[in-house]
Image (cartoon, helix red, strand yellow):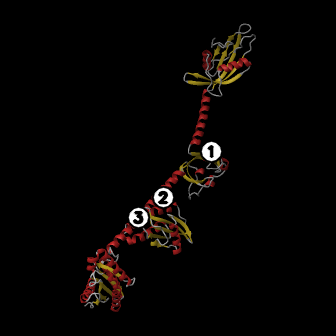
Amino acid sequence: MTHASKSARASGPDGALHLALPQMDGDDACVLAIDGDGRCLHVTPLARPLEALLSAGDEAEPTAADQTTLAALVAAARIGGHVVSGTVAVPDKRLLRVFDLSVLPATSSDDMPAPLLVVGRDVTLATSMRRTLVESRQRYKDLVEVSAAFAWETNAQGTLVFVSPQGVLGYGIDELIGRRPEEFLAEPLDSGAVLPFAAHQPLADAELWMRRADGSAVCLLVSALPLYDDAGAWIGARGVCRDVTDIRERDIAIARARNRERLLSFIVRSFRDEVDPENMLAIAAATVAQGIGVSGCNILRTRVANGTPLSEDTFRVAADFGRTGEPDDMAAVVREFCSGQDVVEIVLGKWNVLAAATRYRQGVNGAIVLWRELSRVPYDDDDRILLSDLSAQVGIAIEQISNHEHILALSRTDALTGLFNRRAFIEELERRTARLKHERRKAALVYVDLDNFKTVNDVHGHKRGDEALMEVKRLLQAATRPTDLVARLGGDEFAVWMDGADETIATAKARRLLALGSTLDDFSGSVDRTLSMSLGIAIYEPDSDESIDALLSRADAAMYQGKHSGKGSYRVAPASP
């Protein structure tokens, strides 16, 4: 075999077969001549990897569906006696060479296998490029299909010509192709804003709200690149959209929660910073109404202890602000609480009412009632959450006020009788005399001291003595008006104040008290030392500058005059100088 000759010899009927091989050794020629025994007769440099397959004798199976083996092509050509073509991959050092081959059988005059001529071309580069392109397209397709974003493309008319399957937002692809993207906007663009689907300049992460097929809104971040033809004319745009609805909704929820926290902090701080407990709930009602944005607000308190069943009479309005419903409307709200509801949301006439019970240690101690006209926006989840948080804070405030009132009552009332004590009585007289001075009206002070009270305790014990004091309280309250003031000044001393009473009224009242005092006989310690009352009367004159202490001293002195001259009587003190 020679590569310089222009012919090759193979066995034939005359012992030799001459094959003309003109210009077989060119750099671009891929020719392999094979004799009937499968030996190489001639090979061009480009076909040398094929010659290696003949000498190896153990050709590997093809790795691609569109490929075959040189042995298979040779066998098919010998059996069929016609030209056979196929693609063969041949390992060549570190490179896998690919050839498109045609095997041409020659004729033979005897029974010997005919020689073959293998002609082909090296398509390694083209095959590699084609495979790379296919893999790249498949990779792009796979990434687009599995990514959170979806791809799109519009044409020069601004209509969609391509949408990746996961980007249909609940629509069929046929419902989108040929449609203008702006038809699916959930809200109009701001003035001057550019629609990304018609972008003439590159855009990155433009936020857009669009409408799903079910009508819900979806927030998309859209990135786009414009498309231009060879003449520089705009022919459309392509890009991707990423669904960030969950992120935006979470951001909105966080922002709304922070806003609620700030508002809650402001409202709670406003009424907790109030020094006077009596004003605390009034400030709470005002800040709640203004903070939530309602027409009016009521804060209710209960009159029962924890565990006591609620009733319509249980609640009373402790504070109110703005425009609120009628008493019948409030009664309807209270009935809902009495039925066991913690949160009430009902429509009453022109009002949309939202109310929540306030609690302390699991017990209902009041309620917050919000009033908003039906013509205004309805309550939303923020309103409900904020009211729930506020109800807990107001429940604590109501309990604090109740404790303050209880402590104040203990400091101002007598522990046994529940009447005003001396300090509270004097404070109240100072307030009343200031008003009477302005109105130029008189008043009467009756000083009451029990006769022989010590004997009751000595003979019957202190328990019986306490019962006698409670009977005196009952007698004094029975003989006075609701506007009169009754107090226990200490021990067995009591006082009665009567606004607008002159000496005539006061002495008549004293005589009645002495008559009623006959019931005290049952508490007496002995027959000769009966329990009775001695009274001293002092008349308050609005033109006088007499102090409360001086007024009490005058009444006390008059009482002792009566006691020394005969117990169970009354005396009127001389007018102040």
Q: Amino acid at mark 2?
A: Arg
Counting every numbered tag in the picture gives 3
Dot 1, how many residues are within 10 Å of its Cα: few (below 14), some (14-19), or many (20+)?
Answer: some
Q: Position of residue 109 (x, y in %)?
A: 76, 11
- In the displayed structure, does residue 533 sit left or right of residue 322? left
The answer to which quarter of the image holds residue 409 is bottom left
Residue at the extreme front: 527
Residue at the extreme bottom: 504
* 2 or 1: tag closer to the N-terminus: 1
Dot 3, how many residues are within 10 Å of its Cα: few (below 14), some (14-19), or many (20+)?
Answer: some
Which residue is tagged 2?
256
- In the displayed structure, does residue 381 sit left or right of residue 541? right
Residue 411 visible, this angle: yes
* 1 or 3: tag closer to the N-terminus: 1
- Circle 1 or circle 3, nearest the eye: 3
Please say if 433 is above or below 403: below
Q: Amino acid at mark 3?
A: Ile
Q: Position of residue 261 (x, y in %)?
A: 44, 59
Q: Mark 2 and mark 1: span between their CA atoms?
A: 35 Å
Query: Which numbered marker is on residue 165?
Result: 1
Which residue is tagged 3?
396
Q: Mark 1 and mark 3: span between their CA atoms?
A: 57 Å
Dot 2, how many residues are within 10 Å of its Cα: few (below 14), some (14-19), or many (20+)?
Answer: few
Question: As rendered, which of 19 and 477 lies closer to the eye?
Answer: 477
Residue at the extreme top: 14
Question: As rendered, which of 417 and 521 lies closer to the eye?
Answer: 521
Q: Mark 3 and mark 2: span between their CA atoms?
A: 25 Å
The secondary element bearing badge 2 is classed as: helix
